[in-house]
Structure formats: structure tokens, C-alpha cells
Image (cartoon, grey):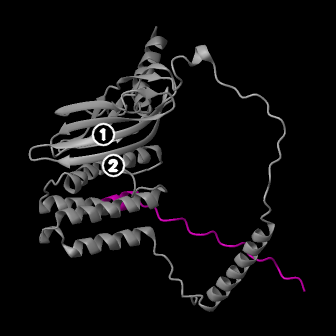
């Protein structure tokens, strides 16, 4: 009985330390809150869709001017294939209208359901999500209605016929000689006018170039001169250019949703994702939704650029020294 009590006390004392050493469960991804535009409509052009032929699926969204809708490209296999997508925005007096044009091709006959469309929405309260249910379109065949009953018209075999063939050998030879002469002439001209070899200036490290760009932007004081929109355009290019070169992907041409999606697929230790999402959302609102930003907000955005560089930049490892030479044999 005493031995059992001693073992129970030992287990009770050691259990908290074991629990403290247990790894924490991974956090589930935070789902974005949904938002609904003030108006949404969709139509298919042309109304009669033939199998394999492209058609346009036009979606028009009416929403407040301080919101920006970005389409998340539909993925996955299905009876339709996305060929092209376009986006247009028009700001009105009280709201804004964003029109998306998606070019599809269908490869199944009958009623085909188009994929649901997801939109990333930049709002003053933060990123949101809107999903538009896909419409069902009727896909018809390109053959006439009586094609199956009548069959296709076939041509019978024809006897061999004489077909005259012109010979262009001489012209081909003259063209080849002329091309060689022109190439030799161009080569001689290039050799005579070739540029002189200039001294190659070594490229500065990434953190030095980014910090120099941030310092130059701070010295220009664009917000103080009333150029808030230009300030956010410049700062967004510096941040995107740094992220693209730091993690090896094309960040300058990405939309805001594509930028965040690409970063989540990469190994980015120390990346302040929440602060980056707030910066991207704030930049989009100022650049595209004509939102205003106070001098303090501009100062905090510039400070975020320095903080992002400090938290994510890792200096490259120095090159390994060459092996020491062996003893000289005389």
C-alpha cells in the first residue's frame, strides 16, 4: 500500500513537467470573414454555347468605393477550362462597379455548372472574402440537328492526276546568298561599333540597397508635400521588390492575394504576416480606392518597411576557404 502511494506521488509531480514539454498543437488557418457587395449580377455571352467554343462569363459587382475586389483564379478539373480573365473598375459618385470578364470553354454537352468564384476583398476593416455561386449553362453540339440521321458526306477515291510542281531552287539559292551577305555585313558593322568594355560595379547586398531606398523615400517627405498616393506606390514597390528577391519569386506583378498566397507556400521564418497583410490592404486602399492616410499612418508604414527588413533578412553565408596546399615536393 505504501509503495502504491509513493508511485502515485512521483507520477503526479512529474506529470506537469511532461505536459509543459509537449509540443503545442498547430494553429488552424484563420478563415476570412465574408462580405457581400451591394449588387451582383452574372451573364453568359453568347447565350447559345457550343461545345469547345469560347464564351464569356461576365460578372458585375457593385460595392462601396473603399473596397477592392480581386478574383481568385478558379482551380481544379471540371467540364470547363478558364482561358482568360479581365478586370475593370469604375468609381461612381456614391459607390464603385467592378466588372470581371472570364473566358471559358466547355467540353461536355447538356447543363454544365460553372465554378463558384471566390473574391479577396480589401476593406478598411481588413481582408474579407466573397463567394459567388456559378451559373449553369446549356452546352450544345456544333453539328446540325439532322446530322446523325443523314451522316457525313464522304468523297470517293479519285484516280491519280498529274500535279505540276514549280522549282524554286534557284530563288532559294539567291535568297540564301543574299542572307549570308547581309549577315556578314551586319557582323562587320557590329564589330566596328562594338561598345567598349566598361568597369563592372559590384552589386551591393540586398539589405543595403533596400535600406538606401527607404532612406531616400524618407528624405523626400512625399506625405508632407501632399503626395500620399505616390508615397504608397513607392513604398509598395520597395517592399514587393525586397520580398521577391529575398524569397525568389515574382512579387512586383502579383496581385495582393497572389502575393500572400505565394509567401504562404514558401519558407519565411520571421515574416510578420499579419502586419504585412495590413500594410498591403492599406496600400491598396490608398492607391486604388483613393483613401486618405494621415502623416502618422505614412510614418508607421515606412517604419514597417525597416522592421520587415530587420526581421526577415539573413546575410548570405561567407564562401568556404579553399583547401590548404599540400607540401611541396622537391
Q: Tell me residue 128's x, y (percent).
A: 25, 37
Q: Which mark is residue 120?
A: 1
Name the dominant secondary structure of the magenta segment: loop
Q: Tell me residue 23's x, y (percent).
A: 44, 33
- Residue 41 visible in the current orientation: yes
Where is 70 relative to 24, above or below? below
Residue depicted at x 44% and y 50%: 268
Q: Secondary structure at mark 2?
A: helix
Q: Determine crowd level at label 2: few under 14, some 14-19, many 20+ residues with C-alpha closer than 10 A.
A: some
Q: Which mark is residue 256?
A: 2
Where is 174 relative to 11, above or below? below
**Cβ atoms under marks 1 and 2 closer than 8 Å:** yes
Q: Which residues are magenta?
A: 307-330
Judge by depth and name the residue closer to the eye, 200 or 144. Answer: 144
In the rendered image, which quarter contains the C terminus?
bottom right
Where is 9 relative to 306, above or below? above
Judge by depth and name the residue closer to the eye, 81 or 327. Answer: 81
63 horizontally vs 210: left or right: left
What is the number of callouts on the image? 2
- Residue 35 visible in the current orientation: no
Q: Tell me residue 256's x, y (percent).
A: 33, 49
Q: Tell me residue 298's x, y (percent).
A: 18, 61
Amino acid at each position: 500500500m505504501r509503495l502504491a502511494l509513493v508511485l502515485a506521488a512521483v507520477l503526479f509531480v512529474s506529470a506537469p513537467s511532461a505536459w509543459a514539454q509537449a509540443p503545442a498543437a498547430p494553429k488552424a488557418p484563420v478563415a476570412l470573414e465574408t462580405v457581400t457587395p451591394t449588387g451582383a449580377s452574372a451573364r453568359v455571352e453568347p447565350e447559345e454555347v457550343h461545345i469547345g467554343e469560347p464564351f464569356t462569363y461576365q460578372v458585375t459587382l457593385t460595392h462601396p468605393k473603399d473596397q477592392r475586389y480581386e478574383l481568385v483564379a478558379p482551380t481544379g478539373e471540371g467540364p470547363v477550362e478558364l482561358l482568360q480573365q479581365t478586370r475593370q473598375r469604375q468609381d461612381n459618385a456614391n459607390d464603385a462597379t467592378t466588372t470581371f470578364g472570364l473566358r471559358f470553354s466547355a467540353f461536355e454537352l447538356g447543363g454544365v455548372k460553372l465554378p463558384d468564384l471566390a473574391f479577396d476583398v480589401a476593406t478598411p476593416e481588413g481582408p474579407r472574402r466573397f463567394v459567388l455561386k456559378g451559373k449553369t449553362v446549356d452546352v450544345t453540339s456544333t453539328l446540325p440537328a439532322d446530322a446523325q440521321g443523314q451522316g457525313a458526306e464522304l468523297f470517293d477515291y479519285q484516280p491519280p492526276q498529274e500535279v505540276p510542281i514549280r522549282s524554286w531552287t534557284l530563288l532559294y539559292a539567291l535568297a540564301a546568298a543574299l542572307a549570308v551577305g547581309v549577315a556578314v555585313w551586319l557582323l562587320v558593322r557590329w564589330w566596328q561599333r562594338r561598345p567598349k568594355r566598361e568597369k563592372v560595379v559590384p552589386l551591393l547586398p540586398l539589405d543595403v540597397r533596400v535600406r538606401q531606398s527607404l532612406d531616400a523615400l524618407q528624405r523626400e517627405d512625399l506625405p508632407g508635400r501632399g503626395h500620399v498616393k505616390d508615397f504608397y506606390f513607392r513604398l509598395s514597390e520597395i517592399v514587393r521588390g525586397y520580398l521577391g528577391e529575398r524569397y525568389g519569386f515574382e512579387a512586383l506583378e502579383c496581385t495582393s492575394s497572389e502575393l500572400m498566397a505565394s509567401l504562404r507556400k514558401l519558407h519565411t521564418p520571421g515574416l510578420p504576416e499579419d502586419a504585412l497583410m495590413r500594410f498591403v490592404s492599406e496600400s491598396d486602399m490608398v492607391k486604388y480606392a483613393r483613401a486618405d492616410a494621415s502623416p502618422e499612418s505614412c510614418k508607421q508604414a515606412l517604419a514597417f518597411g525597416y522592421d520587415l527588413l530587420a526581421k526577415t533578412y539573413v546575410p548570405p553565408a561567407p564562401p568556404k576557404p579553399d583547401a590548404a596546399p599540400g607540401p611541396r615536393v622537391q
